[in-house]
Amino acid sequence: MNADDRRNLETEVMKTGLAGLAGLDGGVSDFVQIIAKIVNDWETSPNRQGEWIDKHKFMRDLLAECNSEDRGAMYSAIAPHLTFKPLPLSSYEAMMTERMHRLISKGAARTEGQAPHPVEVGGQKYVEAEAALATHALVKIHCWTCTRRKNFLADTPVGAMIAARKAGWQRMPTADGPKETCPQCVKKLTKAPRAN
Ligand SMILES: [Zn+2]
């Protein structure tokens, strides 16, 4: 990546609000590594409608946050840090187009106020919808150490995970692998004396 590319990418990252994840002293390479880590850590899971949100769908949504001119730079910066083989950029772009068409064509069919169990996040009520009709993604996480729970909502799973990271939730190493940790426990655990 040349200096211009780096600057463009940095601007782009700032615009998407991802910069807050890296701390103020982080450079572009730190942003990229942190973003790549979010993608790598994403565990494929079905939503309640049975649609599997995998790492590729996550990548699609991440790249969709970028201007089309800067998407190539974002893709080539992140790809080397991924622990899985990414699809070609053109495949993610095709997936974006497909998702957009689905949202546009199904937009009119949104059901509101009919679901028996609306979920409330930030004072707003959301009703469950089929994946193809959904306008928002909900990520529910709970802390492995204190059992605190929180819902994060955004228009895509990427956005919801980013919201969780911004709120201070982190994946921390445990004996059973990395687990979601609430901001309070992150503070406690990182303060504890370490044997190093
Ligand atoms: Zn906790």
Image (tube, grey):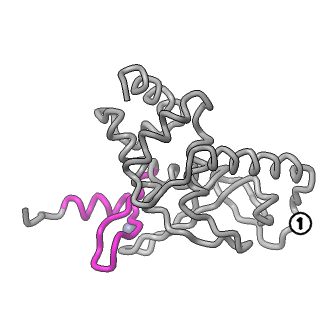
Depth check, front residue: 130 or 51: 51
Some atom of ligand 1 lies within 8 Å of the CB belonging to the residue at label 1: no
Using the image, determine if residue 187 lies above or below residue 16: below
Q: Is residue 63 left or right of residue 76?
A: right
Q: Which residues are magenta?
A: 167-191
Q: Residue at x 45, y 40 (%)?
A: 76
Q: Residue 87 at what x, y percent from top left?
A: 55, 53
Whether residue 75 is in magenta: the answer is no
Q: Is residue 96 left or right of residue 180?
A: right
**Residue designated by label 1:** 114
Q: Which corner quadrant holds the C terminus?
A: bottom left
Q: Residue 151 at what x, y percent from top left?
A: 58, 62
Depth check, front residue: 13 or 72: 72
Q: Residue 92 at what x, y percent from top left?
A: 62, 48
Disc 1 marks which amino acid? Gln
Q: Is residue 32 left or right of residue 114?
A: left
Q: Residue at x 48, y 37 (%)?
A: 74
